[in-house]
């Protein structure tokens, strides 16, 4: 096993995944799935408390903040978390970490941005509906801006992966405004529409894997249902050889 992943490191490729587990997927099932897909890094949203408390026993590393977890084959360094106090709310929506692969420190930003359901499902008029949409957009702008500001403070020219449940599709103007500089793995190498949200009448792709220009995208796909109301998204990426030798 160790030799296999040593060879993988030499080939300079990384298997990454993002999965909103909705607190429904058992820990043992995630370990089994992680190993069966030969993942290197898994970004988890809506994680259970102590989601990966057995990670060391599974020869893996983990870092968990409330509802946000990283599971990795490489040791993890924690940097900063971002909460919703600026929005008058509670809970975390982003956490920044890094891993070391070869000579490269790779930054990992795990995100779970606000959903329109955070502003309630009921409204008594069309004006009320428009107000709800406006609040959603304003909250998104604040959350996106805070994450981008944190990345500017820490990441600089390092390789970066941003992953998570964005609660908007890549066709949304706000997505293009804030995240258009990143490469969206599914847009580059995925097939079909790639729905990640399981719903009876609306099945958008709102879970994303984004990478900085330091990486190259090789393959991306939506994986099978593991019991959440989201489907996991998996990507294979690589660092150029000259980057590995820096």
Image: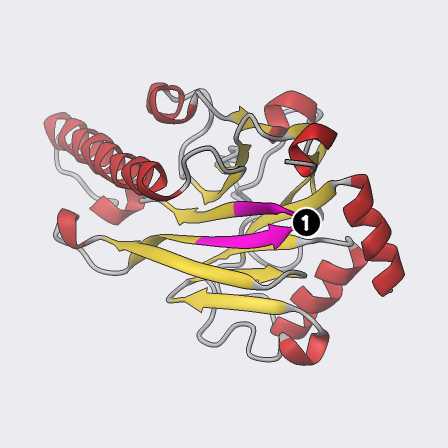
- Residue at 61%, 71% in the rendered image: 26
The residue to which callout 1 is attached is 102
Q: Nearer the viewer, residue 23 or 86?
A: 86
Q: Nearer the viewer, residue 109 or 206?
A: 109
Above or below, comparing residue 227 to residue 214 in the picture? below
Above or below, comparing residue 219 to residue 56 in the picture? above
- Report x, y in % for residue 227: 62, 60
53 in the magenta segment? no
- Residue at 39%, 22% in the rendered image: 172
Q: Secondary structure at mark 1?
A: loop
- Report x, y in % for residue 199: 52, 43
- Report x, y in % for residue 28: 68, 74
Above or below, comparing residue 112 to residue 242 in the picture? below
Above or below, comparing residue 54 to residue 122 in the picture? below
187 sits left or right of 118 in the view = right
148 sits left or right of 139 in the view = right
99 in the magenta segment? yes
Q: Quadrant of the C terminus?
A: top right
- Report x, y in % for residue 54: 61, 79
Residue 120 in sight from this viewpoint: no
Secondary structure mostly seen in the magenta stretch: strand
- Residue at 74%, 31% in the rendered image: 241
- Residue at 77%, 61% in the rendered image: 35
Q: Quadrant of the N terminus?
A: bottom right
Q: Magenta residues, as a range?
A: 97-106
């Amino acid at each position: 096993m160790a030799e296999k992943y040593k060879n993988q490191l030499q080939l300079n490729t990384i298997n990454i995944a993002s999965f909103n587990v909705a607190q429904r997927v058992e820990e043992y099932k995630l370990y089994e799935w992680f190993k069966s897909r030969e993942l290197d890094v898994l970004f988890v949203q809506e994680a259970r408390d102590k989601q990966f408390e057995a990670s060391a026993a599974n020869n893996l590393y983990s870092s968990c903040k409330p509802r946000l977890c990283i599971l990795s084959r490489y040791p993890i360094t924690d940097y900063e978390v971002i909460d919703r106090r600026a929005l008058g709310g509670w809970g975390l929506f982003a956490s920044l970490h890094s891993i070391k692969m070869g000579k490269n420190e790779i930054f990992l930003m795990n995100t779970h941005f606000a959903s329109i359901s955070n502003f309630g499902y009921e409204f008594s008029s069309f004006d009320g509906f428009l107000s709800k949409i406006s609040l959603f957009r304003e909250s998104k702008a604040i959350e996106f801006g805070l994450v981008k500001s944190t990345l500017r403070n820490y990441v600089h020219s390092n390789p970066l992966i941003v992953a998570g449940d964005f609660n908007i599709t890549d066709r949304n103007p706000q997505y293009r405004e804030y995240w258009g500089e990143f490469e969206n793995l599914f847009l580059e190498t995925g097939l079909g529409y790639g729905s990640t949200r399981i719903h009876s009448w609306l099945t958008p792709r709102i879970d994303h894997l984004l990478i900085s220009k330091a990486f190259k995208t090789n393959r991306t796909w939506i994986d099978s249902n593991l019991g959440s109301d989201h489907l996991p998204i998996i990507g294979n990426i690589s660092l150029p050889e000259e980057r590995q030798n820096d």
